[in-house]
Amino acid sequence: MAWNRRAPEAIVAPEPLSTARWLGAGLLMAVVGIVFFMLAAAGEIPVLGTFNTWMLSALPLLLWLLAFSARAYRYGRALGRFQFLTDEAAEAGSAWNQWAQRNMAVLASCVVLPDQISAAALAQGADSLPPRIGTARRIVSLPAEVGRLQVGLDLLLKGVQPMLAGLTAEHPVQVTLLSDLAPEESEQLRSAWDGCCERLVPELATVVPRFAHALSPDWIEASLKKPGTHIDLILVLQVNGEEKYSDGLAALLLCPDVLADLEHLTVEARLLRPMPLALQQLDQELPLFLQTQSQARSATAILADSMHWKASLATLLSLNRVHGGELRAECQWIQESLSGLPGPMSHWLAAALGADMARHRQRPLLLITREGSQHWISTLTTGGSA
């Protein structure tokens, strides 16, 4: 379900007074008054002699003045209402824009995908990369069997270690370990985490991580509604897909924009508030998204997490162009075609890759992902203000 924003009521400006028409009518009334004066003075119409000549002559102009005053009053009221409704609509639109621009600041990120897919590699041209659609790809730097968790955590923590080292005790870190491991393997993950913390990030040794198998993009909405002083470290370990889906590793060090701006933290990218999207109502919901999250119209590229989006990309590009967007047909990427079959954490892997791409390209980027049956759209921007 998309954002529940009601389209503003169409406001039509009142028709202004026609200066030429009213001046013409005034001149006509003046002529009629002169004619009345001449007829009354000549005495050719006896009944006119019963009236005061000057009052009779002024009557047409007085009637015109009353009619003009009534019309001007009605126009003034209509114009005042129009200006009031216009200001209210502008204020409501601005409030919605500010709400949609809220974001999770990406303080640091790291993503490791099969075949060394990265933002730098895509910047050199995705056409030179072999298609990986329908294949389950492995990360060659991970051991084939034993030690995959340990090596994967090492790669991720080394990627965000410099930023973690710079955080003070005033900003406690909450760690979420997203993995596709079976429940009986959770102890292995806990042991691997303890070992990596002791060697690489001793400042996190006392942190008790949260182990999870899924994390919806709706988590961003909840985090923005209740910002705190803590910083979230999300570690994604998708290493158990075998032939069902590809490997993927990602780390995202996130905090609400309010905290990042207040503490003047270094921000690499910004993940703006995501919107749920119904593909069957794309022609209605995408315009709503573009009107509300104005930064989305500045995006020149789009990243999708799976081939599921391929049939909708042409419609997305067309609607984006109609509503003032800047998407380029040559700047669209589908992660599945680059790194193989998507897994249960593909939306977070795409978010981490998108953050790197926005930082590398220094331009906003649209991100479209799927989590189960729910679809999401968001904007990734550079580290400046959203």
Image (tube, helix red, strand yellow):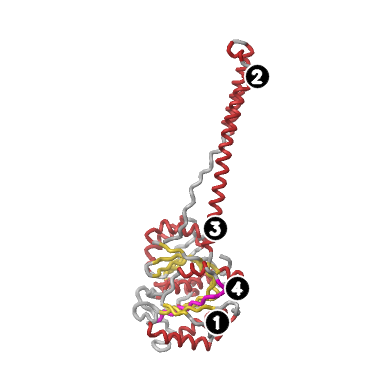
The Cα atoms of the two marked residues, 4 and 2, are separated by: 82 Å
Res 25 quadrant in image: top right
Tell me if label 3 and label 1 are in contact, CB under 8 Å: no
Q: Give coordinates of residue 90: x percent, y percent.
A: 55, 52
Q: Secondary structure at mark 3?
A: helix
* Quadrant placement of the N terminus: bottom left
Of circles 3 and 1, the one toward us is 3
Q: Amino acid at mark 2?
A: Trp
The Cα atoms of the two marked residues, 1 and 4, are separated by: 15 Å
Badge 1 density bin: few <14, some 14–19, many ≥20, Cα 10 Å: few
Res 266 quadrant in image: bottom right
Q: Secondary structure at mark 4?
A: loop
N-term-proximal mark, 2 vs 1: 2
- Determine the main secondary structure of the stretch shown in magenta: strand
Residue corresponding to mark 4:
265
Q: Amino acid at mark 1?
A: Gln
Q: Amino acid at mark 4?
A: Leu
Of circles 2 and 1, the one toward us is 2
Query: Which segment did they paint magenta?
Result: 228-239
Residue corresponding to mark 3:
95
Q: Amino acid at mark 3?
A: Ala
Residue 161 circle label: 1
Within the magenta stretch, is there residue 3?
Answer: no
Tell me if label 3 and label 4 are in contact, CB under 8 Å: no
N-term-proximal mark, 1 vs 4: 1
Res 384 quadrant in image: bottom right
N-term-proximal mark, 2 vs 3: 2
Q: Secondary structure at mark 1?
A: helix
Of circles 3 and 4, the one toward us is 3
Residue 54 circle label: 2
Q: Residue at x 64, y 20 (%)?
A: 55
Badge 2 density bin: few <14, some 14–19, many ≥20, Cα 10 Å: few
